[in-house]
Structure formats: structure tokens, C-alpha cells
Amino acid sequence: MKLDVELQAQRRNLLEADLDELEGLVKEESRKQAEQLQSGVLSPVASEQTVMDLKNQDAAARHPDGQRRRVVLLHMHESSKFPEFEPIGGTALENKRRYARRWGYEMATHLSSGAEGLLKEMPDGSFEPYPEWSTDKDRPYNFQKLKLASAACVGRPDDTWVLWTDADALIINQSIPVAALADDNFDLVMARDWLTINSGVFFLKCSAWARDFLQRAYNAREHDNNWQLGPDQAAILQALEAPGSAEKVKYVAKHACNVYPEEYRPGDYIVHLAGKLYAAGMKGCLALTRQFDALSILDSLPHIDSFFNDKHLLTLPGNQFKDGFENLPELELARPLIDISYPDRYWHIRRMFPHLQDWYDHYDPDAVAERERWTELNRGEL
């Protein structure tokens, strides 16, 4: 009991810690990366062993015909409506801007200060910047991601891909291009969790089908108060019931693009802090956001592995930036952080939902193969 009390006190001190120095480090790294890009260096590399071979990055970002893919990253949060969320949303925005600079992607954003990266069609058929674009005040905020995605397709070619990530999601493995998930044989790519789809992350091609799909989903006002599934997710599911939709959608393994913090393993692409604002509180969610953002400046798997094989929280990966940060608070754990997601990424599901003890990701080939192996083993076929 005494140990539990001490740990709780340590956690409180941890969440109340001033992390401005850590945030400043990431901003400085962003500035350096921008300078490197301008001088012709693709990206900073911490080690020869990287998450993705940098020699193959340019090829991965292109269509099979050799033309470079056009990609737009979407982000939206309004500090005037949710001022307490600004540090989290602002950190996530800078994280995505860094990713966009690295790959030469465009950004389409909506903040309290206005919109950027959006276009509107003029009477003569030309397109002009649309900074006055705004959300609909009479609809749940969840729906505005659909409106922003639709607006981002205006004035852009049909083969443009847009990547929506919620304001509490970050691109952690920035060596992975959007092209790794953007399958041109489909128009919408997303993941499902143990309940339903999760619209916090999705890849969408600006095709005629996708534009119509977004409009139909946005117009489904009957789901404005569907807080069981989430208004936007309920509307998306309804829109996907339309004839011909099934062959337009590709579901991928959840860990490929929509990883919750409990599930993270070094090398994962996008971390989504879904529900952490409520579970950990504003300060706890901000601490998680900044810590994962610090990881996103590294390509080196050894450095990231060393961080997760440590037993201390709020230390920088591999002590790579130790100078000047000796006073950051630390919390020693009984086991390394990596034990959280190994050997079972989804232990937290089984802990929360007894009826989902046997759940597995049907879109994860490795999980399906493991499931089949255990089924055969239990039947005595192996």
C-alpha cells in the first residue's frame, strides 16, 4: 500500500512537470530539418540502421508510373473553442508539419486563426485560396473532419490522397510515406478496432466516389446525437452501405496506422491518443503527446528500442540529447516500457471487456495466421 501511494505521488509530480524544455527541443529539431531540406538533405538520420531504408524513400513516394504522388495532410483544432487543448493540438500540428516538410506534402488546416491550404472555385473556373473556410456551428465537431476532407479535394486532381489524423494523433515513424498505405486500387483506407471503424485516422483518394461518399456521410444529420458509436463514425458506416462501396474500401491492420499508446511498438507509424484526454486528464495527455513527439524526430530503431527497453519515463531516447536535460523528472518502473505491448498488443482490450478475450485483428495477416495456428493446435492437427 505504501508503495502504491508513493507511485501515485510520483505520477502526480510527473504529470505536473514542466516539459517546456522538451517541447523546445522538438521545435529546434524541426527548424534544423527545414534547413536540411532546403540544402538538399532529405532528412536527419541518427543511425545507419533506420526504420525505413532512406534510399527507397523517393521510390516509395511515387506512383508505379514514376509520377510523384500528390498528398495533403489534414489537421484541425480550434483553440478559441477549446483553449485548454491548444498545447496538445499545437504539438500535433507541428508534428505533422515536420512530416509534410520531409516528404514534400501539402497541408490543409483549420485553426481559430483561419484555414490554410484550401481552395475555392471561382466563377471563371479558376481556383483561389480559401482562408475564410469555416466549420458548421450547428453540427457536432466530429463531423467537421468530413467537411475538411471534402474541402481539401476541391481544386486538386482525382488521384490526390489526403490523410486525416485527429488532433490527438501524431506521426511517430516519419520515415514511412503515405504511399505505404495509400493503395491506388482503393479510394478509402482505414482500420477497425474491437468495436467498429475508427475515424481518427484515414487515407482518402479525391476520386468522384470519395467526394460523393464524404457528402453523403456529412449529410447524415440523423446521427448528430449518436454518441454510442460517435456521430461521424455512425454516418461513415451508413454511407459505406451504399451499393458499390465495399470494393472501394480497404481495411488494414490496426497497428499499421492507428496505434493506441498501450499498443505501441518501436517502428509503428501513427499513434492516436484516443480517449487519453479523459483517462489521463489534460496534463497526462499532454505529457504523452510530447513524449511521443520526441520519438518522432528519430529514424534510428536502436535509439527508440533503448528508450522502450528502459525502466524510466520522461528520458530522451538513448540519451541522445542528454546535455541540458539532466533535471527532467523520471519515474522508475518495475518493468521496461516495452513490456506493455509485448507479447500481446491488445491486452488492454481483454482487461476492459471480458467478453472480448478472444478478439483479434481480422485485418492483420500475422494475427490471423496465429489464430489459425492455435485453432489447429487445439484441434490436435499440429
Image (cartoon, rainbow, N blue to C red):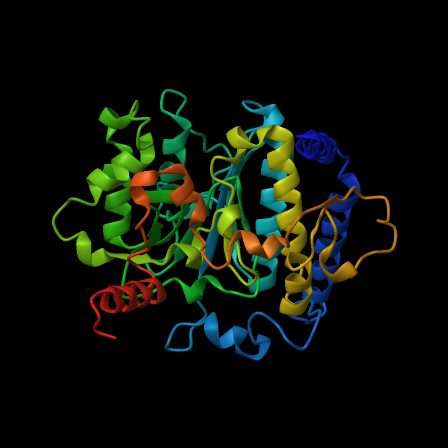
Residue ID at (51%, 29%): 278
When asked about the image quadrant of residue 54, the answer is: bottom right
Any part of residue 195 in sight: no
Q: Is residue 255 left or right of residue 207?
A: right
Residue nearest the viewer, comparing 3 with 195:
3
* Picture layout, residue 58 above or below residue 174: below
The x and y percentages for residue 342 are 51, 58
Numbered marks: total: 0
The x and y percentages for residue 314 are 72, 46
* Picture layout, residue 180 above or below residue 244: below
Any part of residue 140 in sight: yes
When asked about the image quadrant of residue 182, the answer is: bottom left
Q: Is residue 241 left or right of residue 352?
A: left
Residue nearest the viewer, comparing 341 with 290:
341
- Viewport quadrant of the N terminus: top right
The x and y percentages for residue 15 are 69, 33
Residue ID at (40%, 43%): 349
Residue nearest the viewer, comparing 255 with 36:
255
In the displayed image of the protein, which residue is found farthest to the left? 243
- Viewport quadrant of the C terminus: bottom left
Residue ID at (25%, 52%): 208
In the displayed image of the protein, which residue is found farthest to the top? 138
Residue ID at (72%, 66%): 36
The x and y percentages for residue 188 are 31, 54
